[in-house]
Amino acid sequence: MNPMSSDPPRVSVLTPRGRGAVAVIQLEGDLTQLENIARENGIVWFEPRNGRPLAEQILNRIVFGRWGDEDLVICRTGERTVEIQCHGGRFAVARIIENAKAAGASEVRWTALESEITAEYQEVLARCVTERAAGYVLHQLQLGAEYWHSERLQQVDPRDLDQALHWKDFGRHLTQPWDVVIGGPPNVGKSSLINRLVGYERAIVFNQPGTTRDVVSVETAIEGWPVSFSDTAGQRSTVDELEARGIEQAIEAMTRADLRIVAIDQSQPRDDFTAQLIDRFPDALLVSHKADLPRHESWRDFVADDTHSVSSVTGDGIRELIDAIATRLVPRLPSEDAVYPVTARQEALLADELDRRD
């Protein structure tokens, strides 16, 4: 007898909530018993085209049929487990769940079907927005499924703990976009620059200084990494209270950013406020914008050798700037055997273990 045969039957929705073309429902338990109860009590149940009961379907074979008035497919993935793939609408899903419950199954959240650690990684994976980030999370699932149990963590070599701590920001940014903030004087073309970087006109562009009052963000991917670009109010000396507040917000956003970009308009005379901004953020990428126009002589001896000359009009320098942004955000990658936190809980466990050893 199967040692798991006494486990109570369970039903769970595996796909996220919300609109979708297809939903996946997992039914787990004594499939023969569930089906017998359904048919004896007139409960709507799966009617396969091949006429076989659920428990007799060939493993990992897709089977067409109907559930009530809906055409769908099922796949028996284990001795006691079947996956039902139906229309993604919430009413279609709810009807099958209610039928399974009426036959004796208990509805559980999908995470209850996995170990706590595995479910944690699965939730992180669901939040990944790029294939590259998802690949790193899947690799962490393979390496760290047992790592984050407190008893196991206590046995980890101190050097491995230091390595995990080193890569915690990288792990966090697999789901939380790197924050890149672009600052500079009004009408320097920050919005146009963001449009070029993300590949479409997300920012609103006006040929009038000072039109951006708030920090406006747009998310994209660079070299497979999730990135959020933020456009800011033009920074300059001003007595206007509203504009001054926008500039203050811009400086605050640049201070918090993972990467700062200071853009200058090389065709206009250099001003003291922009020079102060460059001095304030010496680690920022400096972009000499509007490179399609002649450079004003005031910038000739001020712009450093590592300044990126870029034109949003012609696209010159955009590819090089994107490469520089990717290199700044992720200068190197973790080794194949490196385990690092990808959730706040894992970060807390790591911090607690390091504190315990101090």
Image (spheres, helix red, strand yellow):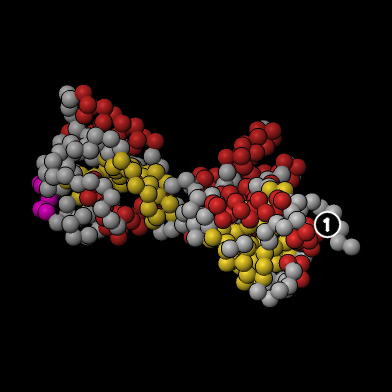
Question: In this orientation, which residue lies closer to the viewer: 268 or 233?
Answer: 233
Q: Which residue is mark 1?
A: 4
- Residue 209 at x, y percent in the picture: 15, 38
Residue located farthest toward the bottom when viewing the structure as drawn: 50
Q: Identify which residue is drawn at 23% across, 46% down.
A: 204
Q: Is residue 179 left or right of residue 58?
A: left
Query: Local crowd at mark 1 within 10 Å, few (<14), some, or many (≥20)?
Result: few
Quarter of the image for residue 5 reads bottom right
Q: Is residue 97 left or right of residue 169?
A: right
Range shown magenta: 293-297
Q: Identify which residue is drawn at 31% across, 54% down.
A: 198
Q: Is residue 294 magenta?
A: yes
Instruction: Specify the quadrant that holds the N terminus.
Output: bottom right
What predominant SS class does the magenta segment belong to?
loop
Instruction: Specify the quadrant that holds the C terminus.
Output: top right
- Residue 67 at x, y percent in the picture: 63, 63
Q: Identify which residue is drawn at 12% across, 48% down.
A: 267
